[in-house]
Image (cartoon, rainbow, N blue to C red):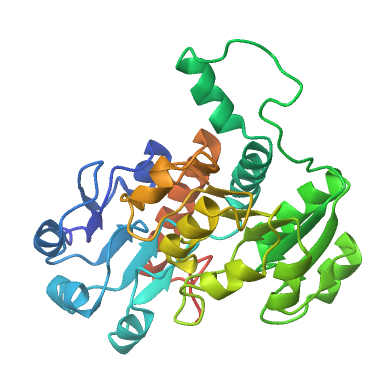
Amino acid sequence: MGAMPDKILVTREIPEAGLRLLADFDVTVLAERPPTRDELIEAVRGASGVLSTATEKMDGEVMDTAGEGLRVIANMAVGYDNIDVKAARQRGVVVTNTPGVLDETTADVAFVLMLAAARRLGEGERLLRAGKWEWWGPKQLRGFDVWGKRLGVVGLGRIGQAVARRGRGFGMEILYHNRSRNGEAENELGARYLDLDDLLRESDFISIHTPLTDETRHLMGERELGLMRETAVLVNTSRGPVVDEAALADALEDGRIFAAGLDVYEEEPKVHPKLLELENVVLAPHIGSATIETRDRMATLAAENLRAVLGGEEPKTPVES
């Protein structure tokens, strides 16, 4: 008799493109909804590999429950703040993610949110659907132009650069803040580096693309929002806790900034109740990478990483930090 195949836990239902690559393993796939903590703990026992998504907290307890045979956690996401990478390293568990395959798709959504918030599209659609749009008027639903304005990109990684390229297509001046200067992007995009405070003061539109770390949690709080122009629009497609939702809701309600577009939230799927009541915020249910093509690529890359590690090879996209 041959050796039993490695047990693989897939923590959510994922596209078939990824599952096909795992057909020769002993695969358990949990439900489409996020598993509870107890469900995750129970299902991970004896797993050699886990294909996780951003909603599952993969900490030392989960790894220890899996047992000493656990060799890889393949996250189907770019961000990996849901994984305790230090705990994984201590246990000899390889962590991988899926960068590069969702940059353009997520950038599309960031720009959609920017346009929709600036032009009050959500507010207008709600008015129309409620049967309250009675006439066209010269002063009705006036927003702000995007063309030719200043775009401030906070975090000029791959997705941030993709958003900046879209901004260039709209004739925008690109400002950016990053942990370190990016000379190549400055040359390509004509981008100008500023410290965060100056970027907030000078930008008409601000798009956030930083990972979630201890340093970036509530990066955009009451003080930072107070530096922005009253006509400014804030967009967040990175991670929810990068923005202080309560402070943002207050700033929007008081008219200290014009509008916001959000795809991510501090306590997903919960949204700050005041945000739900405001007209000047566009809210999307974390759909940044939600195209058929991109989710297939994400699932495929996560599965390829998992297979590589279990086969004794180097994964394509290991998490190095």
**Count of numbered marks:** 0
In the figure, is residue 273 to the left or right of 219? Answer: left
Rendered residue at 65%/69% (across/down): 155
Residue 128's spot in the image, x, y percent? 53, 17
Nearest to the observer: residue 36 or residue 67: 36
- Residue depicted at x 61% and y 62%: 208
Q: Residue at x 33, y 54 (%)?
A: 268
Residue 307, given in percent of the width and then of the height, sits at 39, 60
Q: Where residue 41 sits in the image (x, y, percent)?
A: 12, 64
Residue 4: which quarter of the image?
A: bottom left
Q: Name the residue at 70% across, 63% down.
A: 153
Compared with residue 51, is residue 72 higher up or lower down, i.e. above or below?
below
Whether residue 237 is visible, yes or no, is no
Whether residue 143 sits left or right of residue 145 in the image: it is left
- Residue 81 x %, y %: 40, 70
User: Is residue 60 at least partly visible in the picture?
Assistant: yes
Q: Nearer the viewer, residue 210 or 85?
A: 210
Q: Is residue 316 left or right of residue 191?
A: left
Query: Looking at the figure, which quarter contains the N terminus?
Result: bottom left
Residue closest to the eye, 318 or 205? 205
